[in-house]
Image (cartoon, grey):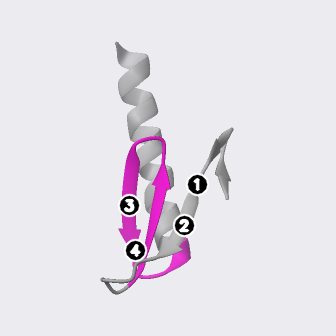
């Protein structure tokens, strides 16, 4: 999966219920793959906004 040019790795967590997504120093969790990915989209947009403000 990708967000723009960044690749996102979504995987099942062994010691927890649900999935995790990892992309450029951000980690998100969700009950499903889609939820973890959607939360990652929000996290990446938040980081991008923070970078462009400086």
- Provide residue 38's location: percent of width, then percent of height: 50, 62
**Which comes before the other along the chain, label 1 or label 4?**
1
- Element at label 3: strand
Q: Residue at x 44, y 19 (%)?
A: 52
Location of residue 51 with respect to 54 vertically, above or below: below
- Provide residue 7's location: percent of width, then percent of height: 63, 48
Location of residue 31 with respect to 28 vertically, above or below: below
Quarter residue 46 falls in? top left
For the image shown, how many numbered marks are present on the structure?
Answer: 4
Quarter residue 1 falls in? bottom right
| Residue located beneath label 3 in the image | 28
Report if the CB atoms under discs 1 and 2 are less than 8 Å apart: yes
- Element at label 2: strand
Viewer-nearest residue: 6 or 53: 6
Query: Which residues, given as a range, are shown in magenta?
Result: 18-34
Q: Quadrant where the C terminus lies?
A: top left
| Residue located beneath label 4 in the image | 30
Q: Nearer the viewer, mark 1 or mark 4?
A: 1
The disc placed on residue 8 is 1
- Provide residue 40's location: percent of width, then percent of height: 46, 55
Residue 43 is left or right of residue 8, and the answer is: left
- Between the C-alphas of marks 2 and 4, the distance is 10 Å
Please tell me how crowded label 1 is: few (under 14), some (14-19), or many (20+) other residues with Cα within 10 Å.
Answer: some
- Element at label 1: loop
Toward the front, the furthest residue is 14
Location of residue 4 with respect to 40 vertically, above or below: above
Report if the CB atoms under discs 4 and 3 are less than 8 Å apart: yes
Viewer-nearest residue: 53 or 30: 30
- Between the C-alphas of marks 1 and 2, the distance is 6 Å
């Amino acid at each position: 999966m990708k967000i723009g040019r960044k690749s996102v790795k979504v995987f099942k967590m062994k010691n927890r219920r649900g999935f995790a997504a990892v992309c450029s120093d951000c980690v998100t969790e969700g009950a499903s793959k889609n939820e973890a990915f959607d939360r990652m989209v929000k996290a990446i947009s938040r980081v991008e906004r923070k970078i462009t403000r400086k």
